[in-house]
């Protein structure tokens, strides 16, 4: 297991770092900072509460420190998150700024959810034998990005060239092993990045994390019928949940993906064969 732990500690207020380091270095999954309330440290065994109430200055420190070094901050803050150095993702709640019925930013953040990015080489070894296009689904926090990262690495080291469209820099932050034949495109929208990868890199496989929009699906369709293998993730608890979401309908109707890897909250997974959507 690998983690850019020092990068995580660096974005926290200095007074908070020793306790977080002591209690969470080995198995912290999330840090939740809520204005006026104690820090919640979420681990595999449950939550621990740090004896320190969060101030507005604490929240401001985390946001400013994380976004200063992140080229993706400006483009993602309107979606309610920041990708910090090391691939750690910071979700935000507070007073939203809305223009033309669309949220364009957070005026005052009152809660932060810092998801700790960890790498587990080898966890996708069993998936290496699965052929065709693969879609990884699961609820938030189930480990979709972690499994996809290792699947990319396994396929790359097995002989296939892979181009990864890593929009937020979460799949392969600095220090994470990419594999021998992996090329990473970061900092641009998935729909644009998929097209660029096809035109410029000539990959055997293209991988992308978190398909959330119709434009993402259309870009995948354009790549998928050009003889390129696809790997992707999407938010859904199971296959029935996936089928109920209109945004994914084009992928289901065309059977673009041959297999679906379904993750459970306990990080285990099973395989579903994609069938025609009725």
Image (spheres, rainbow, N blue to C red):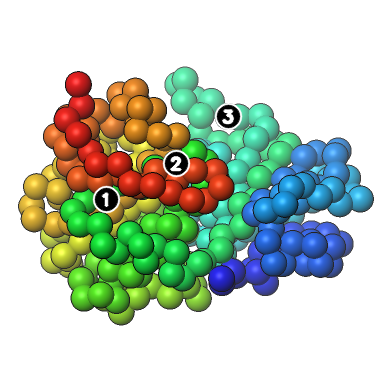
Residue 218 lies left or right of residue 19; in this view the side is left
Residue at 91% over, 50% down:
51
Residue with the mark numbered 1: 134
* Residue 47, image x, y percentages: 77, 47
CA neighbours of label 2 inside 10 A, class few (<14), some (14 to 19), many (20+): many
Task: Give 105 or 17, whichever is nearer the viewer.
Answer: 17
The Cα atoms of the two marked residues, 2 and 1, are separated by 13 Å
Q: In the figure, residue 61 lies in which quadrant?
A: bottom right
Q: Is mark 1 on a helix, strand or loop?
A: strand
Residue 1 lies left or right of residue 24; in this view the side is left
Task: Give 38 or 235, whichever is nearer the viewer.
Answer: 235
Query: Of callouts 1 and 3, which one flags the residue occurring earlier in the amino acid sequence?
Result: 3
The Cα atoms of the two marked residues, 3 and 2, are separated by 30 Å
Hey, which residue is sitting farthest bottom in the picture?
180
* Residue 9, image x, y percentages: 71, 66
Q: What element carries label 3?
A: strand
Residue 179 lies left or right of residue 36; in this view the side is left
Residue at 45% over, 45% down:
263
* Residue 200, image x, y percentages: 16, 65
Q: How many marks?
A: 3
Judge whether 256 appears above or below 231 on screen: above
Residue with the mark numbered 2: 138
Residue with the mark numbered 3: 97
């Amino acid at each position: 297991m690998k983690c850019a732990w020092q990068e995580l500690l660096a974005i926290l207020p200095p007074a908070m770092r020793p306790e977080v380091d002591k209690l969470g270095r080995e198995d912290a999954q999330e840090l939740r900072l809520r204005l006026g309330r104690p820090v919640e440290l979420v681990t595999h065994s449950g939550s621990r509460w740090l004896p320190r109430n969060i101030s507005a200055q604490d929240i401001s420190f985390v946001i400013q420190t994380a976004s200063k070094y992140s080229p993706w901050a400006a483009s993602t803050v309107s979606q309610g998150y920041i990708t910090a150095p090391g691939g750690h993702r910071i979700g935000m709640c507070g007073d939203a700024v809305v223009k033309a019925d669309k949220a364009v930013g957070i005026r005052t953040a009152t809660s932060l959810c810092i998801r700790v990015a960890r790498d587990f080489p080898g966890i996708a070894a069993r998936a290496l034998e699965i052929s065709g296009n693969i879609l990884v689904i699961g609820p938030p926090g189930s480990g979709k990005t972690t499994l996809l990262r290792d699947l990319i690495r396994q396929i790359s080291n097995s002989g296939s060239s892979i181009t990864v469209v890593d929009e937020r820099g979460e799949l392969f932050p600095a220090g994470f092993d990419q594999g021998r034949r992996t090329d990473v495109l970061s900092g641009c929208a998935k729909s644009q990045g998929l097209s660029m990868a096809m035109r410029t890199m000539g990959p055997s496989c293209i991988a992308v994390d978190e398909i959330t929009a119709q434009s993402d699906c259309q870009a995948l369709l354009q790549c998928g019928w050009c003889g390129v293998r696809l790997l992707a993730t999407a938010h859904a608890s199971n296959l029935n949940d996936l089928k109920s979401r209109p945004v994914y309908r084009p992928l289901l109707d065309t059977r673009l993906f041959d297999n679906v890897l379904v993750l459970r909250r306990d990080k285990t997974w099973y395989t579903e064969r994609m069938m025609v959507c009725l």
